[in-house]
Each structure stands twice: as structure tokens, then as C-alpha cells.
């Protein structure tokens, strides 16, 4: 996940500038004349590549380029009697709904893509209208986009915000002395459902939230008053929800400057090395979040369904040093599932692949076998849900402490989740 140009090591620079990253991005939009039209399958990448939310789009595109190179070098995708090379066609929606709609129309009608990957959130509703008419398969990183009216939309990798329960669950088990918390978030389609999730997780863990969650406007730039209001409650736990990195970084810096000594938990801690530089290694020690570095030895366990995660991490950082973040691997993981579906269906046509991906009710999620789920919370079983890692910063490095089961938590506490989603107005029937 991401925010503006604090996020994901972008250092407030444009991806489309003269940096190596910008040149790589520009290259992805160019046609590859070396691939014949009849043996190429085009995949759309419709996400923010510039602007405030670029950090949850562009690094994922970089990961997809590595994925496509690996697959093409290995012979491509064998679907039925044909073998396809993969071409990633990107469109920068700048996290603007009107640009997302225009991008979907171009990718479908002009580029003739067979699948579209998106971040989701505020850009999804207009794309759903286009995708439904075209029966186009679309993926999101935000299952909270799902409703019964999105039959062709899937969340096969990231299960935001539901995975956030695993961090709270681990915290409660390992630090039972921490009994109170405060929460803040930007007031948008990422922040609200995530706040509902943290409220449910804290209640399930017996942790008291000391006041109503503090929602701030997405235009906020001065986070000193926000942090002052949060710390006035003297909490044991400071929860930064799914704040964009442009917010997480100054919020953490303000907590440091204002003398906070307690526990921090956040959905993401993208570019945590920069956070350490702005604060200290001691201040960041023990911060809990949800996204590992892929050099972690725990990603070499047999249940992991990601091809050579350590090698992927090394190659990514060699090409784009300092740009690794939450989404760097996620879109590539989605492509693994799409590829498996195409090969199983013996077809690259969107509806054939969708049926194949969901057949049997389970799928090979990056972190292990998972089930297609979501009807009770989203109105449709189009989210692939299983285990998710709990990550803790130890001695300046992200470390996977444990994989925890999202379905196991849900089976025990689903009534709490639904209660808080309803109170936030985020249940699918309320959003519809």
C-alpha cells in the first residue's frame, strides 16, 4: 500500500522523470515489436504511476516487468494449443476516477487486453461499469471494492483490510500487558474499512480503544496536531491504520519528536529505512506491520507459492534500489494465479480464466493454500483468503514473526467485524 511521494522510497520525485525508474516505466508503455501479435497476450496495468498514490502502483509495475521477463524467458504461457508471450500494457490513472475509466476503455477497446490489474479504492467504481459491460476480468488489492455487483472483480492476493487482524492478534498474544490503543487514518476508501477492521481486532483482543478514531483529511500536511491529539490519551498502542506512506512517515516522526515510547502498529511501513533515519533504530524497534521483505528466510518454506522470492527481491533491488515496498511483489503474485488459471482453462479469455481460477473453491495464494471467500462481508466469494505474515522491525530489519490465519480469526470473531463495518457504513449493502 502507499501514499504520495514520501512513500516507497520515491523521495518526492516523479517516476516519469529522468531517473532509471522513470526510463524503465516509460519502456513498459512502448510496444515490443519483437513479439508477434498472434503469440502475445496483453495484460493491462491500470494504476497510479505518478501523483499522490504512485507508490502503490509503480513499484508493482516494476515487479510485473520482472515477472513477465522470467515467464517469457521460460517459454511463455501454454494455454491449450497455443503458447503466448506476455506483454504488460500500463496506463497511469493518477488515482483519479475519470482517468481510471478512460484507461479501462483504452486497455479493453484499443489494446485488447485479457486481464486488468488495479490498486482499487476510489478508482474502482467507474472501471466496474466498463468491465461489467465488457465481461473483463479485473483484479484489485482492496477486497472492500467487492460487492455482488462486481462478478468479474477478484482480490486474489492482498486481502486489505482483513489481514490487519493478524497483526493485532499476534500483538495481543505476545504483549498482553498492552491494554489501550488509539487509531488515526485518512478519511477515504482505504482508511475507513481499515479502521473498522482494527476496531474489531482490538475488541476481539480485549484492547480498549480510548477514543473515536481520528480521521484526518487527505490534504493534511501538518501532522503535529494529529499526533498531539492521539498521544494526549496516553495509549499503550499507537495504530496508524492503512495510512499512506506520505502520512505514516511524518506521523512516526511526530510520535518520535513528541516523546512517544509505546508500541506502534501499522498496516504498512514502506521505506522503513527512511523512517529509521528520521527517528532512530531504537524508536522503530518492535513496530508491527504486514509486509515482508522478500529476502526473509520464512519465505522459503514449502507452502509459499511465489517463484524464487529471494532471487526476485535481489533482482528488484538491483534494478530499482530503494523502491521496494508493499506492492512490489503483489501484482506479480496475481500474475502467477492468472497464469495458472489460463493454463488450467487452456485459454486466455477472461471468463474462461475466471472460472478456472475459482474452480474447486481454493487457490495457491502467495503465502499458502487459500479459499475463495467474502460472501458474508463483501456479498461475493471473490477474495482469496488464507494465511498472512506478521512482520516486526528488529534491529532495523523487517522480520516475519509468524504466519497467522485470517479465516481462523474470522470464524471466531466475524460478528465483531460485521458490527464495526456496519457502524462505519462499509458493508457491501451500505456501499451499494
Image (cartoon, helix red, strand yellow):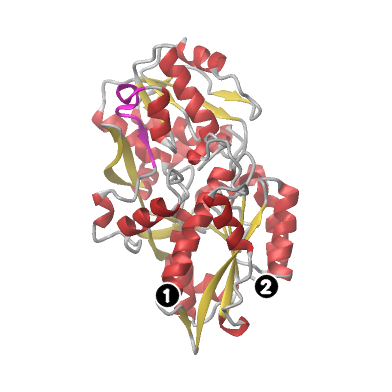
Image coords of residue 264 (percent x, y): 38, 26
At 54% from the left and 38% from the top, the residue drawn is 193
Q: Which residue is mark 1?
A: 73
Query: Where does the magenta region start and end?
Result: 280-290
Image coords of residue 310 (percent x, y): 30, 56
Is 421 above or below relative to 78? above
Which residue is most to the top?
232
User: Which element type, helix, strand or loop, lies under badge 1?
Assistant: helix
User: Is 424 on the left-hand or right-hand side of 68?
Assistant: right
C-alpha gap between disc 1 and disc 2: 23 Å
Which residue is most to the front?
18
User: Observer-nearest residue: 29 or 237?
Assistant: 29
User: Observer-nearest residue: 191 or 147?
Assistant: 191
At 67% from the left and 46% from the top, the residue drawn is 94
User: Which element type, helix, strand or loop, lies under badge 2?
Assistant: loop
- Local packing at callout 1 (Cα closer than 10 Å; few below 14, some 14-19, many 20+) is few
Residue 299 within the magenta-colored segment of the rendering: no
**Quarter of the rendering containing residue 359:** bottom left
Is 145 above or below relative to 115? above
User: Observer-nearest residue: 404 or 204?
Assistant: 404
Q: Which residue is mark 2?
A: 112
- Local packing at callout 2 (Cα closer than 10 Å; few below 14, some 14-19, many 20+) is some
User: Is 235 on the left-hand or right-hand side of 354?
Assistant: left
Image coords of residue 52 (percent x, y): 62, 38
Image coords of residue 258 (percent x, y): 44, 12
At 38% from the left and 57% from the top, the residue drawn is 315
Asked whether residue 334 appears in the rendered view, the answer is no
Q: Mark 1 or mark 2, which has the lower sequence index? A: 1
User: Observer-nearest residue: 208 or 11?
Assistant: 11
Amino acid at each position: 500500500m502507499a501514499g504520495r511521494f514520501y512513500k516507497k522510497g520515491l523521495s518526492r520525485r516523479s517516476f516519469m522523470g529522468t531517473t532509471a525508474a522513470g526510463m524503465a516505466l516509460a519502456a513498459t508503455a512502448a510496444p515490443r515489436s519483437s513479439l508477434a501479435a498472434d503469440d502475445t497476450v496483453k495484460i493491462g496495468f491500470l494504476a497510479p504511476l505518478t501523483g499522490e498514490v504512485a507508490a502503490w502502483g509503480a513499484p508493482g509495475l516494476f515487479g510485473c516487468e520482472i515477472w513477465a521477463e522470467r515467464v517469457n524467458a521460460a517459454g511463455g504461457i501454454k494455454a491449450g494449443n497455443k503458447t503466448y508471450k506476455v506483454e504488460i500494457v500500463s496506463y497511469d490513472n493518477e488515482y483519479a476516477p475519470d482517468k481510471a475509466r478512460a484507461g479501462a476503455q483504452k486497455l479493453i477497446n484499443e489494446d485488447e487486453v485479457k486481464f486488468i490489474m488495479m490498486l482499487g479504492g476510489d478508482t474502482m467504481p467507474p472501471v466496474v461499469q466498463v468491465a461489467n459491460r465488457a465481461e473483463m476480468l479485473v483484479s484489485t488489492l482492496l477486497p472492500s471494492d467487492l460487492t455482488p455487483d462486481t462478478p468479474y472483480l477478484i482480490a486474489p492476493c492482498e486481502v486489505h483490510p482483513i489481514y490487519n487482524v493478524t497483526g493485532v492478534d499476534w500483538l495481543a498474544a505476545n504483549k498482553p500487558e498492552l491494554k489501550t490503543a488509539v487509531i488515526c487514518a485518512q478519511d477515504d476508501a482505504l482508511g475507513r474499512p481499515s479502521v473498522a477492521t482494527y476496531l474489531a481486532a482490538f475488541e476481539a483482543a480485549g484492547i480498549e480503544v480510548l477514543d473515536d478514531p481520528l480521521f484526518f483529511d487527505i490534504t493534511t500536511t501538518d501532522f503535529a496536531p494529529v499526533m498531539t491529539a492521539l498521544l494526549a490519551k496516553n495509549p499503550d498502542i499507537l495504530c496508524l491504520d492503512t495510512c499512506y506512506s506520505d502520512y505514516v512517515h511524518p506521523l512516526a516522526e511526530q510520535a518520535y519528536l513528541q516523546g512517544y515510547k509505546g508500541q506502534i502498529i501499522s498496516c504498512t511501513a514502506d521505506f522503513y529505512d527512511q523512517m529509521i533515519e528520521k527517528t532512530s533504530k531504537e524508536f522503530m524497534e518492535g513496530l508491527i506491520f504486514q509486509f515482508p521483505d522478500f529476502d526473509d528466510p520464512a519465505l522459503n518454506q514449502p507452502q509459499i507459492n511465489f517463484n524464487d522470492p529471494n532471487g526476485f527481491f535481489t533482482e528488484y533491488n538491483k534494478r530499482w534500489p530503494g523502491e521496494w515496498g508493499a506492492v512490489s511483489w503483489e501484482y506479480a503474485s496475481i500474475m502467477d494465479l492468472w497464469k495458472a488459471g489460463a493454463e488450467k482453462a487452456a485459454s486466455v479469455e477472461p471468463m474462461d480464466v475466471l472460472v478456472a481460477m475459482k474452480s474447486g473453491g481454493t487457490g495457491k495464494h502467495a503465502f499458502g493454500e487459500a479459499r475463495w471467500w467474502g460472501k458474508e462481508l463483501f456479498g461475493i466469494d471473490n477474495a482469496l483468503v488464507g494465511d498472512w505474515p506478521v512482520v516486526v522491525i528488529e534491529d532495523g530489519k523487517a522480520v516475519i514473526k509468524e504466519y497467522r490465519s485470517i479465516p481462523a480469526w474470522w470464524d471466531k470473531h466475524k460478528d465483531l467485524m460485521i458490527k464495526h463495518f456496519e457502524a462505519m457504513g462499509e458493508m457491501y449493502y451500505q456501499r451499494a
